Image (cartoon, rainbow, N blue to C red):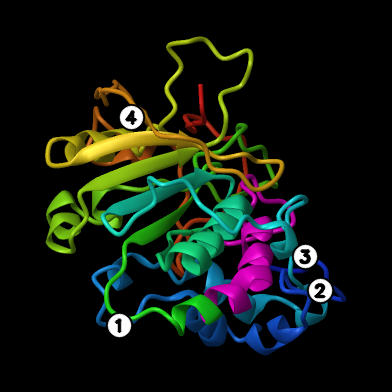
Amino acid sequence: MRRAPSLGPVAIGDPTGLDAMGEADWRKLLDPAALHAAWAPPDASPWSAFQRPTLFAALDSLHHDAVGPWVPPGFDIASAPRELPEWIDGRTAVLLELPGALSVAYGALLAQRAKMQPVATFNNWPHQAEVGDAKAALGALLAYASWARDARDRIEGVTPPAIMLDAWRLGTRMPQPRDFDNRYFLLDSDLPSAALLAKSGIERVVYVHPPRRPDAPPEAPEDMDDANPYLVALAKRMTVAFAEARTDGWGLGPLRTAEVKLRKTPFTTTTDPSFRGFRRNAAGGFGVLVPEPSSGGYVGGFG
């Protein structure tokens, strides 16, 4: 587990609250290694190489009196659906392209109800002045850890991955001076290749995203810019489909098939998008205080 940078006073979730199961077991998981172990695929799993330790490691530099679980409104376990859509099966991998905390909630749900293996790709540090919302994702990792661990203990062998992405990773606004710029991006190598998925019996990948905004134009893409080339590569070897997930409470919609086309973005026009203003931390991952106005930063999103 990598060493966390100095993060200063950061408040995470509710230090006096209970986890999503209504218990206080999350207090046993304030050690980074313990929380990581609750979510991590087994070492022998083909998905273990894609789990990122950054956000878990942040616990080392946080005051635990200010850290607690966070359950997004509408996502308590008591109201979680017992039945899932029929497209969730043993041959389907899922990419959860949702705000980080919601990806965590749905990842835990898929682990419990479908015996899928959650994989956390979060690669930034939390901060009170953060541009992204790593705090919410970390609070959710604490909130749903016991549920995910309970599911993992009942899983045997290799099961399809439920890859938890943060849909806000590219940022929703331009960083300003004294902001903590923790935007980050994913490359194809950060996610399992089509060959590895196929070798593990995966025939289809479903990209789960939030509902389209009412004011979004019909041509607005539903995949993130950095995910686009990855989905294009997958589509050459297997089926790629889309599905919506509610963001105000549990709910996975039906499949929608569509041709995945390569778009012109910073991630398809250069092999090194770091020049776009993303700030790597010396301890690994992304997240650095902005000392002066950002010039050339990149903001992404869902159209």
Region in magenta? 125-149
Question: Which residue is under mark 1?
Answer: 43
Callout 2 crowding tier (Cα within 10 Å): few <14, some 14–19, many ≥20: some
Question: Which residue is under mark 4?
Answer: 266
Question: Magenta-highlighted stretch: main secondary structure?
Answer: helix
| Residue at the (61%, 35%) spot, across then down | 293
Q: Which amino acid does label 1 sit on?
A: Asp
Q: Distance between the residues labelled 3 and 4?
A: 34 Å
| Residue at the (63%, 12%) spot, across then down | 215
Q: Distance between the residues labelled 1 and 3?
A: 29 Å
Label 2 vs 3, first from the N-terminus: 3
Question: Which residue is under mark 3?
Answer: 13
| Residue at the (54%, 73%) spot, across then down | 148
Label 3 vs 4, first from the N-terminus: 3
Question: Which residue is under mark 2?
Answer: 66
Of marks 3 and 4, the one in the foreground: 3
